[in-house]
């Protein structure tokens, strides 16, 4: 996020599986927030707010209309770019 703030027109972020609260809590991000902030209550509050920020990140992006960028690949059931655009 710091690079995006420093270079807003040159750095683009896409959402991946670790920006899901279920995955990042399971993989230790919630614990790390609590540890770094010194309490479970403060850690949970920051973790929750960060996950709200992650929800604003796009799941995919295109470059010049011809390069599709996604984290971890495309689901097997998706066949067109319109299907990705329709996701909420």
Image (tube, rainbow, N blue to C red):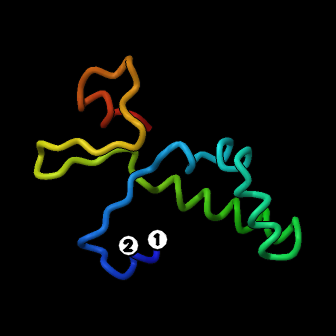
Q: How many marks?
A: 2
Vertical arrangement, residue 71 with respect to residue 55, above or below: above
Location of residue 37 (image quadrant): bottom right
* Element marked by disc 2: helix
Pick the quarter of the image with the C terminus: top left
Give the residue number, with chain letter if any, for mark 2: 4
Vertical arrangement, residue 37 with respect to residue 58, above or below: below
Residue drawn at 53 percent across, 42 percent down:
17
Q: Residue 1: which numbered mark, if any? A: 1
- For label 1, the crowd category at 10 Å Cα-Cα, with few meaning under 14, some 14 to 19 and many 20 or more, is few
Foreground residue among 18 and 61: 18
Residue drawn at 39 percent across, 75 percent down:
3
Residue drawn at 87 percent across, 67 percent down:
41
Residue drawn at 24 percent across, 25 percent down:
80
Vertical arrangement, residue 81 with respect to residue 24, above or below: above
Location of residue 71 (image quadrant): top left
Name of the residue lying farthest toward the top: 77
Q: CA distance from mark 1 to mark 2?
A: 5 Å
Q: Is residue 83 left or right of residue 75?
A: left
Q: Is residue 16 left or right of residue 44?
A: left
Q: Residue 16: which numbered mark, if any? A: none
Q: Is residue 27 left or right of residue 64?
A: right
Tags 1 and 2 touching, CB below 8 Å: yes
């Amino acid at each position: 996020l710091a690079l995006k703030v420093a270079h807003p027109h040159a750095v683009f972020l896409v959402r991946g599986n670790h920006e899901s609260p279920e995955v990042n809590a399971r993989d230790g991000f919630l614990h790390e927030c609590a540890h770094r902030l010194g309490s479970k209550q403060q850690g949970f509050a920051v973790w929750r707010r960060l996950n709200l920020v992650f929800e604003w990140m796009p799941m995919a992006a295109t470059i010049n209309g011809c390069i599709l960028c996604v984290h971890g690949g495309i689901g097997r059931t998706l066949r067109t770019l319109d299907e990705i655009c329709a996701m909420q």
